[in-house]
Image (spheres, rainbow, N blue to C red):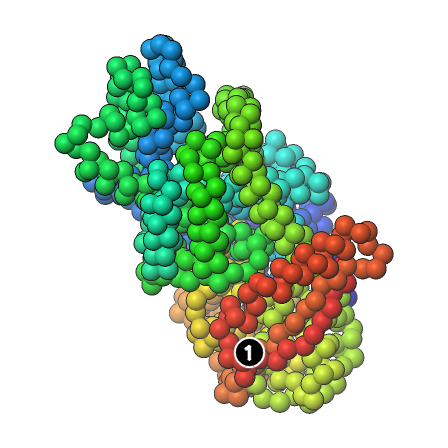
Amino acid sequence: MEEHDTIEESSVRLVGSSGSGSDSRWVDGAELDLESLSLSLLTGNEGREGYGSMRRRLVKKPKRVDSFDGEAMEIAGAHGHHSKDQTMWHTIALAFQTLGVVYGDMGTSPLYVFSDVFSKVSIESDIDILGALSLVMYTIALLPLAKYVFVVLKANDNGEGGTFALYSLICRYANVNLLPNRQAADEHISSFRLKLPTPELERALNIKETLERRSSVKTLLLLLVLMGTSMIIGDGILTPAISGAVVIISIFMLVALFSIQQFGTGAEAMFADLGHFSVRAIQIAFTCVVFPCLLLAYMGQAAYLMKHPDSAERIFYDSVPDTLFWPVFVIATLAAMIASQAMISATFSCVKQSMALGCFPRLKIIHTSRRQMGQIYIPVMNWFLMIMCIMVVAIFQSTTDIANAYGIAEVGVMIVSTTLVTLVMLLIWQTNLFLAVCFPLVFGSVELIYLSAVLSKIKEGGWLPLAFAACFLSVMYTWNYGSVLKYQSEVRGKISMDLMHDLSSTLGTVRVPGIGLLYNELVQGIPSSFGQFLLGLPAIHSTIVFVCIKYVPVPVVPKEERFLFRRLCPKDYHMFRCVARYGYKDVRKEDHQAFEQLLAESLEKFLRKEALDLALEGSMNELDFDSVSLRSRNSGPPPAGGGNEDLRIPLMHDQRLEEAGTSMSEETPSALPSGLMSLDEDPSLEYELSALREAMDSGFTYMLTHGEVRAKKNSYFFKKLVINYFYAFLRRNCRAGAANMRVPHMNIIRVGMTYMV
């Protein structure tokens, strides 16, 4: 095979002595030997030798120059991120908006905390009340304020928060994703933004190599993330259930709450995307409003309990003056619904992120807003949450047992967050080792104390979140496990390039006008399903594009960076590889016509760029040959640096080439070949473009594979049980790929495949 099973690729940059950041050439291991190349050539600066040695550990040698890399670098350079300057008034306005959305859950805690604390322990003296108050105050100050607002909040993924956002952030810096489809070109997405080296880089590299080398560590990290996500989904069930006091009224409110989700309440867009608020706005809202208000609320309830210790069961409403009872009741009800809405929205967001990273079966996602990409609605999850909430309320019928379950879910998410943020501090932030160790020691110790306390309540409702977590964890890990095995099976079954060359450009059949889009999951090579199409169809399309829909560990991929192309065979084959990249927050709601148009435009751009690069490469070779011939005729001394200067010839970008006709000196055009001067008249390019347009006029056909995954006969029993029954059940009942693309059935051709894993 021309392409090996190794999926990951990377590049090493040679910077010219001119020092310009754009004057760089990206080459692969076939062009030079990194071990024999001096560090001064790798870095272009002798003072950065340490960085050069560490850079070689950050990347792996690729096998060849990749058109994906060149195209990705070119686009990424033109779309850098620029932070938006926000005025103080704008920040204050954002801080106000966070009150009901981000802090709705915490803001409703005074409704039930003291009543649950003293539900089974009677108040003997004021010391009991002050002790409970102190515990609440110190907990709020230590965990939400110190840990989350001032530390964890900074560990966001380009504005995205949550367990999977932290996991995607770690996946960008270390290749820990069990699905081996990472490419070097992904690192050039404008939102990737890897951190520059620091003096702590050596330790970070050791952690990175440990994570990438040991598959058991990768699996453990994934299980930890899935457990945290399962707990969050459990919160989405328990938060609405704990918000009511009367069973009948609570069930009525739950049905109403979940019924309006399909219309978009709009809260999830801001809750799931910290970028709508900014870290500063959330910090201001909590420290200046939420934190003092919570302290006042709990101190007021404690003062009332000291005078009326028998009011512990209904402390919140009993402490309200009679004239303000109904207004406060309405406000409390609305606050509880906002808190429930926030957790429901968070559940939708977590499920969508899990689907994007290959850890959850495909479900129907409805985007309820044309302007806010985060405003989503997942019907299956919505009705599942509603049924579970109603069952919880009907079975437990008291907030005490529900609070016990809620406590285990919350503490579980906290421990997962502490672990992941510690890893972020060591690997990405490259924090001082002492500070990085203090974080889990201080906050982790407190959370473990709380965990030991809530685990004692397992028989009193605490078993519920553990059951939910076990259920969702089984579903998510089984889906990820089966998907990884299926991908590995596809990699092993790739069609060799030797066979393609033997078939010649006709592919052993008849080529008819049209574009065939063969969907598969491979980022390299030709899938075995293509052989099934060649055997089963009387003819094949004149242009074949192997399309891979791939999610990368970033929130959003700009549309202009969506497609990456590569030619798979000689030109007369008209076969291409297209990787369509999406972030886990991206909205895939474009119809097939828009997708086809964008793909065709990107393919035409690729063909023009390819022809331009070939012409430029030829011109550079001629210039090098002329300069070598001229140097051999002259008797002058060689330039400084010996023969290494040839390695620093820059590979120009399109922007520079567009200016070549007007900015080059008059002597340069005479030395360039005529092919570069008349690129628009290149007959081979014009022929290929005309063939592409003819194929587009004939239409697009979607070539899909209906795959069945089966465990090999010699597999152990548990693997057969998981793959042949559980994973197969999930695949049969999840949303099909064609449904996600909204493609008319008349434009689809399917073949059956069985993947033995």
Compared across the picture, whether 692 is left or right of 154 comes to: right
Q: Is residue 748 visible?
A: yes
Tell me residue 473's x, y (percent).
60, 45
Residue sitting at 53 percent across and 56 percent down? 356
Q: Does 387 appear above or below 138?
A: below
Tell me residue 484's x, y (percent).
67, 55
**Number of disc labels:** 1
Quickly name the residue at label 1: 675
Q: Label 1 sits on what residue type? A: Gly
Q: Name which quarter of the figure residue 152 lies in.
A: top left
Q: Quadrant of the N terminus?
A: bottom right
Q: Nearer the viewer, residue 272 or 527?
A: 272
Residue sitting at 47 percent across and 33 percent down? 401
Residue sitting at 24 percent across and 37 percent down? 329
Q: Does 307 appear above or below 733?
A: above
Residue sitting at 58 percent across and 88 percent down? 513
Q: Nearer the viewer, residue 659 or 600?
A: 600
Q: Nearer the viewer, residue 575 or 396?
A: 396
Compared across the picture, whether 542 is left or right of 274 comes to: right
Query: Which residue sits furthest left?
Result: 323
Q: Name which quarter of the figure residue 715 lies in.
A: bottom right
